[in-house]
Amino acid sequence: MALMDFIKKQFIDILQWTEDGDGTLASRFPMAEMEIQNGASLTVRDSQLALFVNEGTVADVFSPGMYKLTTQTLPVLTYLKNWDKLFESPFKSDLYFFSTRTQLDQKWGTPNPITIRDKEFGIIRMRAFGIYSYHLSDAKTFYQKISGTRESYTREELEGQLRNTMVAGMTDLFGESGVAFIDMAANQDEFGKAMQFKMAPMFAEFGLTLDSLIVQNVSLPEELQKILDQKIGMNMIGDMGRFTQYQVANSIPLAAANEGGMAGMGVGMGAGIGMGQVMGQSMAQAMQPGAAPQAPAPGATPVATPAAEDDWVATLEKLHGLSEKGIISKEEYEAKKAAILNKLT
């Protein structure tokens, strides 16, 4: 009866695993009730590792190659004492395969803005995202800490843990760097290298090797970005008084073409130029850190009064009319207009 039971047993002669491309990192070989035949062939392909577990304990890890499982060819087994004696007859054991391929284009990012202290803007909230790549390098550690006895363990199941751990490390890194937000875009490569160095030990604890980490973008939330854009725009404009006068001067031909002509717009334009001068002075003071508002200096030239405005508005209107009738050229009109505006400023 024992002989018949032995004959009925199924033996495994070839042990191998072909990855299916679904992001599987660990896969258990389907043993069922079968036993491994003495002299069976184990094939571990490039970008793979194989791990035997006997009675719940890791027996050995095999790197890429082809192995004959016999007592003569397995003196290298190290994790279990007397492991080779198991091969004196067919034996039963768990076998796991692991993919060591580089997992490319893995994405990380801040699900919510992180708060850091910026040396230029004070307390700010910012976002960051990028990509990273890694590969499984220590099958025993990965089995003991991550995959365990499951039939398979995929890359997607590990993604959340890796991404959230990196975001936590990135918050510390950006906060401790002392680099102003406005300069972070110019230092993204350095941040990526520093972050890879910081995260490598964490990956090693899981039996993984972090191959690369890239910071692709650092930005502010939309409401803060609008404020930054306004500040940049003010810096680009510079002298608000000249900018306002330039806009008013260019609007004179358009005003003359509208119903009511320049006479109807005269007071408004005069007030615009006067307001431009006041705004220019106020903005110049405001742009200086710590500067207090100053009153106009004694003897300073006053802004144009409504009575004086009527004269030069009428003159500009006449000149524009002469230009439209071809009595004077447009170049002459522009020159005279510029002369009048220079007198006002």
Image: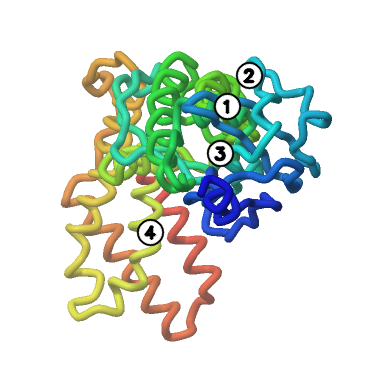
Residue hosting label 3? 92
- The three-letter amino acid code for the residue at tag 4 is Ala
- The three-letter amino acid code for the residue at tag 3 is Lys
Residue hosting label 1? 140
Numbered disc in front, either 3 or 2: 3
- Rounded to the nearest angstrom, the CA distance separating label 3 from label 2 is 17 Å
User: Which residue is drawn at the image coordinates 20% and 66% (left, top)?
Assistant: 265
Label 3, secondary structure: give it.
loop
Q: Nearer the viewer, residue 328 or 221?
A: 221
Label 4, secondary structure: give it.
helix
Are the two marked residues, 1 and 3, in contact with CB atoms closer than 8 angstroms?
A: no
In the displayed structure, does residue 157 sit left or right of residue 113? right
Label 1, secondary structure: give it.
helix
Are the two marked residues, 1 and 2, in contact with CB atoms closer than 8 angstroms?
A: yes
Mark 3 and mark 2 lie on one chain; the one further toward the N terminus is: 2
User: Which residue is drawn at the image coordinates 36% and 78% (left, top)?
Assistant: 321
Numbered disc in front, either 1 or 4: 1
Numbered disc in front, either 2 or 4: 2
Mark 1 and mark 4 lie on one chain; the one further toward the N terminus is: 1
Residue hosting label 4? 249
Residue hosting label 2? 79
User: Which residue is drawn at the image coordinates 67% and 36% (left, top)?
Assistant: 89
User: Which residue is drawn at the image coordinates 37% and 56% (left, top)?
Assistant: 247
Instruction: Report x, y in % for residue 110.
Output: 36, 38
- Rounded to the nearest angstrom, the CA distance separating label 1 from label 3 is 19 Å
- Rounded to the nearest angstrom, the CA distance separating label 2 from label 4 is 88 Å
Mark 2 and mark 4 lie on one chain; the one further toward the N terminus is: 2
Mark 3 and mark 4 lie on one chain; the one further toward the N terminus is: 3
